[in-house]
């Protein structure tokens, strides 16, 4: 097995597809002297501990300080332009979306179509059927897609699921967001949080540098993570607004908004050990980033489009209280579009426990982020994922990888 040189990025902590970077604008600014410090002996970058980046909690199972273990990808099934992966409680099948609008169930290497909404999905470039998740009881399938009509409209809808199939004729549309100006930065992640609510990662609406000025606008649903209760419609909406949402009363922002200041939060996840929320946000032209905060922390501002990674974007001032990423990947060696994963909590690969597994869509190298007392170290896992669009985590905490042509499981080598 081939191992690439270890990539090390250290970001110190403080108390507390994916869609590629694009656009012609290059303005990123340099690291701000008060924030970034470089160790001349190693070249590693540190963020002083007085910033707002969260520390890894000491109560979580800690990863080993040793080098990451040898791993491999075991191929399970081929798929056509797969985009997202989900598991259903008590169900041995793995469920994957295909960009054109189909949902496939994978069982013992065989695939079966369990739903098809291709007649209503707009595909091409970054558009299509982009996300799915099941309700906790497995009786409802939630899908995230871009609509043919109105053109490009981001749509989150619910479908009854029984006897191995989704009833697409009984579609219940929950959220629609206009997205007709640009075709990129659609987001696409859906997740059921530890609190039982439905979360959705929505891109900033596209175009280089966020020309629509949506990400920091708390009244816009673009450039956000949303949180809703799809089981309790209220206020004339087909969903409820959780009381803990930062703008639940609607005075200072849209009630659905949970977090803002994001460019294209293509994939996010929670650490099942402590509920930390990790958001991998696709960068502009210079830096990719991974953010991590306590999962119950509402109203976090991640800084885009005033910040790209740890850097000022086009000389803009840092927003008050903005949270810095725990991991930053510069656009070097083919890096261009981060694909977020999970903190590993399975049992098959003990040496990976507590490490955050992720990759970059363009260079395809699987990586593992490890928290230390000084910050986060990012190490290579020594294998290529072949344009990974997403990761998945089963009930046992084992990880799966969905790439441009199929589904694999992460196994010990």
Image: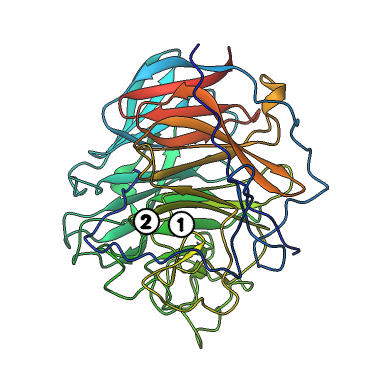
Which is nearer the eye, 219 or 352? Answer: 352
Residue 313 percent across, percent down from the top left: 40, 69
> Residue 35 location, x and y as percent?
60, 66
The nearer-to-camera label among 2 and 1 is 1
- Residue at (37, 54) in percent of width and height: 286
| 239 relative to 177 in the view: left or right | right
The numbered mark at residue 200 is 1
Q: Give the Cα distance between marks 2 and 1.
A: 9 Å
Q: Is residue 87 visible?
A: no
Q: How many marks?
A: 2
Q: Is residue 208 above or below residue 314?
A: above
Q: Which residue is mark 2?
A: 156
Q: Which quadrant: the C terminus?
A: top right
Q: Position of residue 192 (x, y in %)?
A: 56, 50
| Left or right of residue 403: residue 14 | right
Is 212 rendered above or below residue 110? below
Question: What is the image's colouring?
Answer: rainbow
At x 77% / y 48%, what residue is drawn?
Answer: 373
Horizontal and vertical percent position of residue 321: 60, 76
* Residue in the image at 58% along x and 76% along y: 246
Is 364 situated above or below 107?
below
Under circle 1, the secondary element is: strand
């Amino acid at each position: 097995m081939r191992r690439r040189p270890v990539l090390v990025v250290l970001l110190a902590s403080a108390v507390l597809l994916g869609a590629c970077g694009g656009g012609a604008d290059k303005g990123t600014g340099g690291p701000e002297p008060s924030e970034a410090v470089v160790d001349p002996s190693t070249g590693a970058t540190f963020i002083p501990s007085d910033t707002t980046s969260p520390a890894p909690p000491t109560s979580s199972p800690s990863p080993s300080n040793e080098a990451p273990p040898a791993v491999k990808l075991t191929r399970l099934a081929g798929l056509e332009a797969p985009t997202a992966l989900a598991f259903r409680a008590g169900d041995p099948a793995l469920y994957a979306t295909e960009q054109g609008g189909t949902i496939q169930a994978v069982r013992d290497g065989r695939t079966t179509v369990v739903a098809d909404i291709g007649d209503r999905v707009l595909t091409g470039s970054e558009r299509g059927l982009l996300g799915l998740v099941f309700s906790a009881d497995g009786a409802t399938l939630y899908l995230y897609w871009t609509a043919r009509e109105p053109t490009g409209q981001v749509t989150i809808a619910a479908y009854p699921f029984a006897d191995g199939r989704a009833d697409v004729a009984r579609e219940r549309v929950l959220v629609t967001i206009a997205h007709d100006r640009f075709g990129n930065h659609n987001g696409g992640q859906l997740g059921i949080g530890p609190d039982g609510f439905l979360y959705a990662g929505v891109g900033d609406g596209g175009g280089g540098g966020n020309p629509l000025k949506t990400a920091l606008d708390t009244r816009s649903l673009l450039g956000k993570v949303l949180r809703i209760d799809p089981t309790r419609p209220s206020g004339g909406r087909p969903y409820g607004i959780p009381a803990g949402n930062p703008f639940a009363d609607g005075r200072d922002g849209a009630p659905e908004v949970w977090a803002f200041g994001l460019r294209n939060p293509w994939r996010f996840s929670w650490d099942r050990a402590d509920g930390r929320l990790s958001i991998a946000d696709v960068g502009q032209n210079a830096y990719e980033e991974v953010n991590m905060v306590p999962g119950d922390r509402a109203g976090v501002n991640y800084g885009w489009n005033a910040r790209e990674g740890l850097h000022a974007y086009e000389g803009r001032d840092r927003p008050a209280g903005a949270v810095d990423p725990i991991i930053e990947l510069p656009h070097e060696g083919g890096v261009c579009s981060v694909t977020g994963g999970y903190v590993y909590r399975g049992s098959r690969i003990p040496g990976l426990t507590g490490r955050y597994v992720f990759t970059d869509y363009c260079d395809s190298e699987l990586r593992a982020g490890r928290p230390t007392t000084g910050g986060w170290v990012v190490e290579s896992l020594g294998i290529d994922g072949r344009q990974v669009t997403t990761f998945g985590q089963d009930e046992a905490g084992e990880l799966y990888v969905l790439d441009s042509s199929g589904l694999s499981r992460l196994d010990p080598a």
